[in-house]
Image (tube, rainbow, N blue to C red):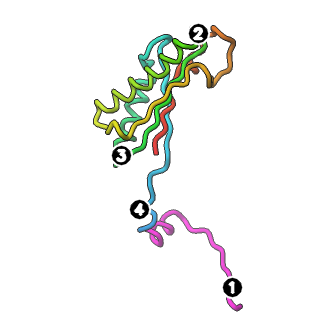
Amino acid sequence: MTGTIRFEKLSEPEVRASFERVVTALPARPISFLLYFIRGEDTLTEASRRERDRMLGELRKRPTPDIVVIGHTDRVGRDEANDRLSLQRAERMKSDLVRDGLAAERIRTAGRGEREPVVPTDDGVDEPRNRRLEISVR
């Protein structure tokens, strides 16, 4: 065999120029959001309402987003109640997103209750970072 293999690093503009059709055909990169709740409710905190608006803007940039919404709770309350509340939070977000124009069939929901805390705590501990929605978009 003859010839030489040459390695070189291309800048993003060079990649786009050389592979424009391939690059434009690629789906948008996955993105994730975390939204937080007021204790015992399916009401977002003020900061999370602002983050939700930013998230909605990102979702609208994607022609056919696949969205997974997973609700979580802190460790205050009974397991069964936390399971219901976590799913209620996810379903509420789905309803809000559908009301805002996203297709219901593109959104899946689940509730995990208190099983997957971000901050491990003892039972009965009020930890705001565990009262959340994880929203994944691809």
Q: Secondary structure at mark 2?
A: loop
Q: Which residue is mark 2?
A: 76
State the residue position of label 3.
Answer: 61
Q: Which mark is residue 4?
A: 1
- Viewer-nearest of discs 2 and 1: 2
Which circle's residue, 3 or 4, is located before the other in the chain?
Answer: 4
Q: Amino acid at mark 2?
A: Val
Q: Position of residue 134 (x, y in %)?
A: 51, 31
Give the residue displayed 45% in from the left and 59% down from the top: 26
Question: Magenta residues?
Answer: 1-20
Between 138 and 8, the residue placed more toward the observer is 138
- The local secondary structure at tag 3 comes to loop
Residue in the picture at 44% in, 26% down: 90
Which residue shows up at 42% across the image and 43% down it?
Answer: 66
Please state which of residues 56 and 8 is positioned toward the viewer in this rendering. Answer: 56
Residue 133 x/y as whole percent: 49, 27
Indicate which disc, 1 or 4, sits on the residue closer to the N terminus. Answer: 1
Q: Residues within 10 Å of mark 2 (few under 14, many from 20)?
A: some
The magenta stretch spans residue 41 = no
- CA gap between label 2 and label 1 equals 66 Å
Tell me where residue 5 appears, x and y as whole percent. Answer: 68, 81
Residue at 40 percent across and 24 percent down: it is 49
Q: Which residue is mark 4?
A: 24
